[in-house]
Image: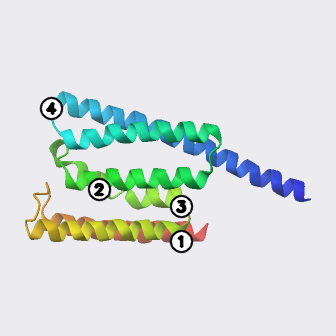
């Protein structure tokens, strides 16, 4: 009986490993696409540098997945990369200022990667970062591409999506 349970447990991690490998490859391709778009449009240098770094990080992680490195390490690196990207999307210039539209997806990525209990902390961290960004913008300490009002509204959207993602993931 234990061999069935152990094989089912191992199968679950093999499936998770395959999914995470695909997530990294698709992420690298999407980031390369946006680097190309930014290059053609001659904009968003800071964002493109971060995206290029994240392509290298995704490929590094992909190789680590293939080598059998613990998934917890892969997930932590992936989430730190997402935190960096989603932070850059509201801090730096983006094409036609569309970076802010992507930011609302952060909670769904956090809840895809982690359990509900861990994802909520990553979401709270990001919401706190958005609120700090709103304060920085309102005090004009740094010229963000978005107003404080836009950033505060975005924090509210991320909070509401975090709650929805948490409720969904908690029922599974």
Label 4 and label 2: CA atoms lie apart by 21 Å
At mark 2, the secondary structure is helix
Q: Which of disc 2 and disc 4 is earlier in sequence?
A: 4
Q: Residue at x 56, y 45 (%)?
A: 20
At mark 1, the secondary structure is helix
Q: Position of residue 57 (x, y in %)?
A: 43, 41
Q: Residue furthest left?
A: 140
Q: Residue at x 14, y 58 (%)?
A: 146
Q: Residues within 10 Å of mark 2 (few under 14, many from 20)?
A: some
Q: In this figure, which residue is indicated by the disc labeled 1? A: 117
Q: Which of disc 1 and disc 2 is earlier in sequence?
A: 2
Cβ atoms under marks 4 and 3 closer than 8 Å: no
Q: In this figure, which residue is indicated by the disc labeled 4? A: 42
Q: Position of residue 111 (x, y in %)?
A: 49, 61
Label 4 and label 3: CA atoms lie apart by 36 Å
Cβ atoms under marks 2 and 3 closer than 8 Å: no
Q: In this figure, which residue is indicated by the disc labeled 3? A: 114
Q: Residues within 10 Å of mark 4 (few under 14, many from 20)?
A: few
| Quarter of the image with the C terminus in it | bottom right
Q: In this figure, which residue is indicated by the disc labeled 2? A: 87
In the image, residue 6 above or below residue 133: above
Residue 38 placement, left or right of 14: left
Label 3 and label 1: CA atoms lie apart by 8 Å
Q: Which of disc 3 and disc 2 is earlier in sequence?
A: 2
Q: Which of disc 3 and disc 4 is earlier in sequence?
A: 4
In the image, residue 40 above or below residue 133: above
Label 4 and label 1: CA atoms lie apart by 41 Å
């Amino acid at each position: 009986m234990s061999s069935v349970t152990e094989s089912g447990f191992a199968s679950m991690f093999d499936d998770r490993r395959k999914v995470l490998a695909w997530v990294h490859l698709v992420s690298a391709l999407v980031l390369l696409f946006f680097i190309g778009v930014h290059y053609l449009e001659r904009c968003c240098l800071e964002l493109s540098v971060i995206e290029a770094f994240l392509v290298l990080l995704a490929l590094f992680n992909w190789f680590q997945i293939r080598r059998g490195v613990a998934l917890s390490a892969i997930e932590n690196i992936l989430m730190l990369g997402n935190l960096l990207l989603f932070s850059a999307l509201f801090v730096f210039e983006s094409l036609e200022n569309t970076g802010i539209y992507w930011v609302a997806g952060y909670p769904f990525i956090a809840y895809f990667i982690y359990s509900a209990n861990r994802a909520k902390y990553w979401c709270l961290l990001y919401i706190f970062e958005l609120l700090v960004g709103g304060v920085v913008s309102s005090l004009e300490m740094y010229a963000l591409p978005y107003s404080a009002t836009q950033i505060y509204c975005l924090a509210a959207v991320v909070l509401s999506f975090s709650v929805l993602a948490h409720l969904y993931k908690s029922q599974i």
